[in-house]
Image (cartoon, grey):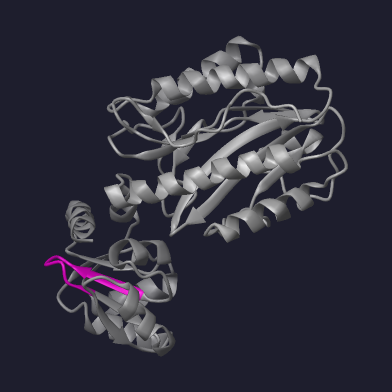
Amino acid sequence: MHQRRKNLLKFCDQVGCDTLVAFEPENLFYITGFWGEGICVLKKNGTTTIITPILEVNRAKNESTDSEVVKSERGKNALSTLISKLQGSKVCTDSNNFDVIRSLKKSISIVKPSTVPFYHARQIKDASEIAILKKASKIIDEMFEVCTNVIRKGQSEVELQSILMSYAIEHGMFDTGYESTLNPLIIASGPNGAFPHAQVTKRKFTDSDMIVVDLTLRYKGYVSDATRTFGLGSISREAKKVYEIVKESQKAGLKAVRTKTPCKSVDSACRKIIERKGYGKYFLHSTGHGIGLEVHELPNISAQSKTKLEKNMAITVEPGIYLPKKFGVRIEDSLIVKDIPEVMHKFTKELITI
């Protein structure tokens, strides 16, 4: 925690502040080790305070590291307690709540709403974070193995999701709570696979389906993310062709990952292959993103990115081709950036036809 706090304060200095105030649970957890309801104050000298309602006090004390825990009820009481801790401070906060910012500015001379210190510090993973991500990735690989054993004709997307989530929960993995979906997983079969972020439906698997299985799950706070696409029964020649193009594209993207390499170069490596094969307009999203305490973090692996990869960033590489009303194919791994990148998922990327 000491090194994390030091890194956060370094970025805090860069935005002209000396105190960080975290409202988001991811940032509270990153600073203290406590995931729950509360406000965290991190001062330049490294002292850390958690302001939390009485129902969370004992858990906050039990789970946090080197943190003072202060009881204060929700709403105005919590803000009053927070303001009392900030006198004379130059504050950077992850809150973008208008009422919160207005209340702080009434009493504190410098208040800057900014997520920059948080997201930039969290880009580089420490040894404990990497160990958790590796374990999460191993469990996801096991879930792909489950897919090979349980997928069958007549099974629905929602039935497969239920089987996989049962396995995940039994092994300590949970839904990420990602706001843009109603489902914990993406299970997209046949024409549903043409939607990169398809919702899980009651559609039943049929012969010749391509089935996109995107497993994005949280383990001990951290998110691992991987996708495999399975075939069912008699796969069409076109589906096999598209699968091989995506596999080649993903291989090129992984090969391009190196420290000091521009993120856009990784995107370009994937995209060029798909474009060369005539499917460029069907690659509908960026090549990848950072992972960590949230599903999508910095850096962005896209053509617009101006960031260079750094050692111990955790990212995804996930090219895909999506043919409307036909099928989709995506292959995705999470990896740790090094001079020789460490791909955390070992499950095969050869086409498995069930």
Q: Is residue 201 left or right of residue 169?
A: right
Is residue 212 in the magenta section?
no
Q: Position of residue 9 (x, y in %)?
A: 19, 58
Q: Position of residue 56 (x, y in %)?
A: 41, 83
Residue 70 visible? The answer is: yes
Q: Residue furthest top?
A: 276
Residue at the spot 28% in from the left edge and 47% down from the top edge = 127
- Nearest the camera: 302 or 187? 187
Q: Is residue 303 left or right of residue 201?
A: left
Residue 265 occupies which quadrant of the picture? top left
Instruction: Give the dominant element type of the magenta stretch: helix, strand or loop.
Output: strand
- Nearest the camera: 293 or 152? 152
Q: Is residue 280 left or right of residue 122?
A: right
- Nearest the camera: 349 or 236? 349
Please give the range of residues in magenta. 39-48
Residue 54 occupies which quadrant of the picture? bottom left
Residue at the spot 54% in from the left edge and 19% down from the top edge = 249
Q: Position of residue 8 (x, y in %)?
A: 23, 56
Q: Position of residue 170 (x, y in %)?
A: 59, 60
User: Looking at the image, is 255 positioned above or below residue 67?
Assistant: above
Residue at the spot 53% in from the left edge and 47% down from the top edge = 139
Residue 179 visible? The answer is: no
Position of the N terminus by quadrant: bottom left
Residue 144 occupies which quadrant of the picture? top right
Position of the C terminus by quadrant: top right
User: Looking at the image, is 337 positioned above or below residue 91?
Assistant: above
Q: Is residue 310 left or right of residue 227?
A: left
